[in-house]
Image (tube, rainbow, N blue to C red):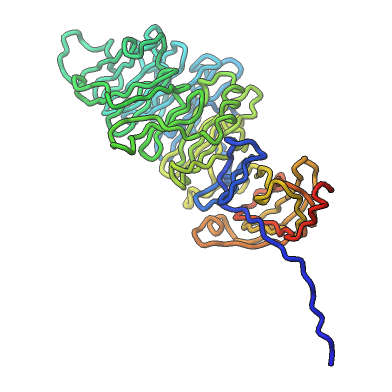
Amino acid sequence: MSDVVAIQTVPVRPAYYADFQGIDRSLERIAAEMRNSTPLWDCWNATCDWRGTINREPAYYHVTESGDVKVRTVKFINFERIAWAEENDTFVALNTDRQEIVPEAFLGGTRVNMTVFQGQLVAFGNGGQTPYKFTGNAWNFLDIGIQPSMGVVLQNRLFVAGIKGKPTEVQASRVNNIDTFPGQEPADTSEVTKAAFIDIKNLIGTADEVTALGAFELNRLAIFTNDQALIYVVDPDFSKWQVDQRANIRIGCLGPNAVVNVEGELFYCSRHGVHAISRSDANGLTLMSMSMSLKIEKLYRQLVKETPDRAYISCAYDQDDQLFHVFFPRANEQHIRLTLDLSSGFENPRWTASDSLWATCGDTLAGRFIYGTRGGLYEVAGRKPDYAEPADRVRGQMRVVTPILWHRDPDNTKQSVKMRLIAAGQTRLVIRAFNEQNVELTTIAVDVEAGDALGDIRSDVPLTKSFELPFPYRYRGVWLSIETDEGDIGDCRIIAFSFDVRQNQDAGAAGRR
């Protein structure tokens, strides 16, 4: 009779990390670990969606018609055509995808704001310069007797502001007439659809001036200054214009390109963060400003401080992927973008960052999204299935950094056995692990080969593959840096990771490494 030998095993407990929340700098790195979700200290060139998964940003291809110019503003003219402002050493030029160019449209360094009214694209430049309109095949001066620096369309009128010599005035065109403003109206005109204006200097109570305009809810005009906003109810009949007394917005906007409509709300960028003008949950009537960037307020303020002229900060919203982007132009041309994933709703904003393309601006229309960069225009790949997209793609290097992970026990030293990574895609991930004193423990390369295409790994069907990695290290806390190989453009999605930690710790060895 043979003896039965029992194999003794050391019990382990898993420390599981999933439901990634994007960048969260609201707490110090040593105190950011949470029980039911996982905030990230850094997340570059990726987004965190409503499932809590980390998705690598899509690939992009170059719009060859744009060349390699420095694009400062981009706007869709219609479904197929694009216009942009490009900067050289001396001037800012206006150009289109058919090379209809005005090489010396504005002085160098001009901030350009664009909007579309009556099927014509209008380009405004700051500093008292005459705006342009694009009529379909050529740029022409918009000679309206004033030189505004911004415009927005609402209730069949073009509202403009930033007028030289009239910093608190907002002028509106005649209804359905791009060429007639108050200065062109006959003195005896009594029509309620005539051109009109609003002057807010006696309403704001300070020496401030108009910095941006926004339109929302079909008939609400937001007039921003540096420190506050007034909301007007407007109508084709100018005699019905009035201040919305239910609005109380005491945070201003940085510039004319830093405001955009997002899912029916008006998002804008202030000195302190990103805010949304929305209706109060209490009564559904009061308009108030809600902060969307508390998790990244320190990072946001740092980027604003590093921007040479904060009025050049801009934003855009990608409706198809529910991504809100904020662009920070930098003096060294290595521009930064912050991205907010809104797929989980306004109550749980998930922020990430990007230096991919070094983008300066963006615009969207009918599913397409265009980025303006220091090297021309780039479009998000895969958005036009009926269009032969170029084979050459570029993609930013995904980089994820966790806060210090204590496995819910910040006091004791742990002995880990192995690590598990649950991921999908077609790429190689390089994982570097450090202890709480920033001493590197190991570097592990993982070839992820789960999911055949971008559509697969982003679908609602859970597509996962678990990679078990040896991890025999002692530490009190650990943090990870996870990167894709530089130059690799494969898809990647990280669902979760975990550590198997021995349960019977030697208390006497708590201080040893």
Place of residue 2 in the rendered image (x, y in percent of width and height, measured from the top left): 84, 89
What is the x, y in percent for residue 330? Answer: 61, 24
Q: Which of the 4 image quadrants contains residue 146?
A: top left
Taking the spot 44% from the left edge, 36% from the top edge, the residue there is 81
Identify which residue, 40 or 11, lies in the foreground: 11
Relative depth, front residue between 441 and 406 = 406
Vertical position of residue 428 compared to residue 245: above or below: below
- Place of residue 340 in the rendered image (x, y in percent of width and height, measured from the top left): 51, 39
Q: Quadrant of the N terminus?
A: bottom right
Residue 163 location, quadrant:
top left
Name the residue located 55 percent from the left edge and 15 percent from the top edge.
Answer: 108
Point out the residue furthest to the front here.
Answer: 508
In the depicted view, which residue is nearer to us: 418 or 139?
418
**Residue 173 in sight from this viewpoint:** yes
**At x 59% / y 53%, what residue is drawn?**
18
Q: Is residue 431 left or right of residue 224?
A: right
Which of the two residues, 120 or 200, is positioned nearer the viewer here? 200
